Image (cartoon, helix red, strand yellow):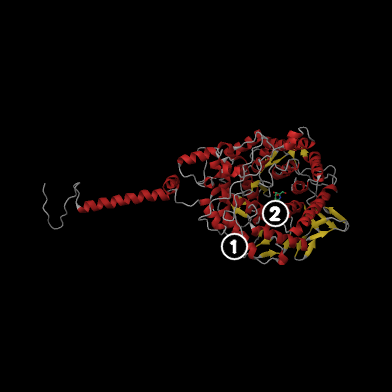
Amino acid sequence: MHMRKGPGFVPASPWGLRLPQKFLFLLFLSGLITLCFGALFLLPHSSRLKRLFLASRTQQPGLEVIAEVAGHSPAHEQEPPPNPAPAAPAPGEYDPSSRVGPRRRKEWLRRTRPTGPREEATVARGSGAAAPRPGEESVPFSFDFNAFRSRLRHPVLGTRTDESKKPQSRVRAQREKIKEMMRFAWQSYRRYAMGRNELRPLTKDGYEGSMFGGLSGATIIDSLDTLYLMELKEEFQEAKAWVEESFHLNVSGEASLFEVNIRYIGGLLSAYYLTGEEVFRIKAIKLGEKLLPAFNTPTGIPKGVVNFKSGSWGWATAGSSSILAEFGSLHLEFLHLTELSGNPIFAEKVRNIRKVLRKIDKPFGLYPNFLSPVSGNWVQHHVSVGGLGDSFYEYLIKSWLMSAKTDMEAKNMYYEALEAIETYLLNVSPGGLTYIAEWRGGILDHKMGHLACFSGGMISLGAEDAKEEKRAHYQELAAQITRTCHESYARSDTKLGPEAFWFNSGREAVATQLSESYYILRPEVVESYMYLWRQTHDPTYREWGWDVVMALEKYCRTDAGFSGIQDVYSSSPNHDNKQQSFFLAETLKYLYLLFSEDDTLSLEDWVFNTEAHPLPVNHSASPSQAWPRH
Ligand code: DMJ
């Protein structure tokens, strides 16, 4: 039918549409296009498509965010220094990098998001990572495990040259004995307390404790890397299966930020770096996210306790203070959480803590143990290298080492703090024992806690990077402090050391009251033996370590696991009925390493967090990259 042109009349389009209809159609079409693109960019599961579209132009998220946090522009600085030659795998050692070619190893891009589905599949295979099981949460970032492994200087478990040279050597037998102790501790736990936080060996059951906010399996997570190190393969698989199937993060209690970080996050991170199993990486990141509300304070200094349910940091206790060793011992793990997730927030949180500590006045250069997260001021002037302060200092020197010696700020803070400690806290007893006292506003308590005995190892570890004129001095200081800690063991009936020992009234390196005479399977003394052994190869440290092994066997071994004892000065001490998870994470691990070759978890490749979980040195660090540098 022919239409006549008249007012308000619009001719039909070639498809028979009139102008208003055409306009409406175009409007609808443009709406549809906008909707599609909106979905592409905004919906959470669109990342793969986004990569297809944007691959060539996007920045690598991990690098970008970490470099930004470090105060560097990431724009043109993504190529790391050439990787060192990949370490050859130890005989029989799992070596995921063997599945990939050299080109692939070289490519820094591999630590970033894959650029397409095919590559994604390759990365998953090449990384040796088990694909997440149905229903398992994943994180939208992939870490290039192969590239990381190829940068290590040594095979993870070492070359075991002592074994090939002297298969029946004494040191090997000693190591085997320690391995047997670990197997026994693990099997007892598994038998009586599997899934609980720790084992009670006398009552043959488990308990949860109040530090973990409803999380369970602390012993399992703490044991993973020790089982791996000792090649207790079946036991490792049991532990891993539990993490996969039963380690649930949907808990709602109040947890210690510090304890969850050093034991759970540290344990999961190490397990990931040792094995490349995705489940550990994913759970570490998810758990790390649950800790973030602790930082929502006026200063960003986290409170010690985080409520997993409300996410609050406990305003009800706003008057209370945060503890130096707690908020100062997050740095290593949180940098790795950013490294493995591509999410800068973890690194930002710990860098802010640094900033606050850097700015604040320090009495005589000392760091008091309590700080208000509200005002950012010290709450009282109590300084200690033992409990409340200890691992803050440890994390400074280890941050320096973990950054492949690029984090100058950590280095400077560490050596400045050590100078102040030496000036104001260090003493020599009339009997010639060197010790680090505790400082209360200028008055000294002439005592050392067992916890402070880690400092021999720390000072030894940091000695070689000190100013040249100080190096020998620090090495000697480390040896003297370790000797004092050994004395605290040697002067007891059990040859195990008390929780605290004094230098008063003619009594030296002994506890002065029953309430300080207990030993709860702590690691700090054998930790120092291990570091001193690696630095000096003085056989004394192995002898001292072996004395501890014998004492543990005699006084702490029960029918169903190891237990702490209530009085180290009694030749028939009562047990405390606790097999602490750090006994498996730390004490047995450090003992085992004391009787291992230096290239087993080499200190060139790994730093141990304060729960003895090995975290890798960032060998890809360069002036332009990821890790904080000043
Ligand atoms: C461990 O949980 C850690 O070493 C922490 O830093 C302090 N104490 C215990 C072991 O004694």
Q: Nearer the viewer, residue 492 or 462?
A: 462
Q: Quadrant of residue 228?
A: top right
The image shows residue 408 at horizontal and vertical percentages of 65, 58
In the rendered structure, which disc, 2 or 1, sits on the residue that comes first in sequence?
1
Residue 126 appears in the rendering: yes
Q: Is residue 121 left or right of residue 407?
A: left
Label 2, label 1: how many angstroms apart (C-alpha)?
Answer: 23 Å
Residue 485 in the image: state x and y as whole percent. 80, 51
Q: Which mark's residue is nearer the viewer, 2 or 1?
A: 2
Residue 100 falls left or right of residue 270: left
**Is ligand 1 within 8 Å of the beta carbon of the residue shown at mark 2?**
yes
Give the quarter of the figure containing the C terminus.
bottom right
Q: Residue at x 17, y 50 (%)?
A: 12
Query: What residue does disc 2 label?
Result: 394
Residue 317 showing in the rendered view: no
Secondary-structure class at tag 2: helix
Residue type at numbered disc 1: Thr
Residue sitting at x 64%, y 63%: 358
Q: Quadrant of residue 589?
A: top right
Neighbourhood count class around disc 1 (C-alpha, 10 Å): few under 14, some 14–19, many 20 upward: some
- Secondary structure at badge 1 equals loop
Query: Is the C-beta of the residue carrying label 1 under 8 Å from the nearest atom of ligand 1?
Result: no
The tag on residue 174 is none
Kindly identify the amino acid type of the residue bearing the numbered disc 2.
Glu
| Residue at numbered disc 1 | 299
- The answer to whether residue 429 is left or right of residue 469 is right
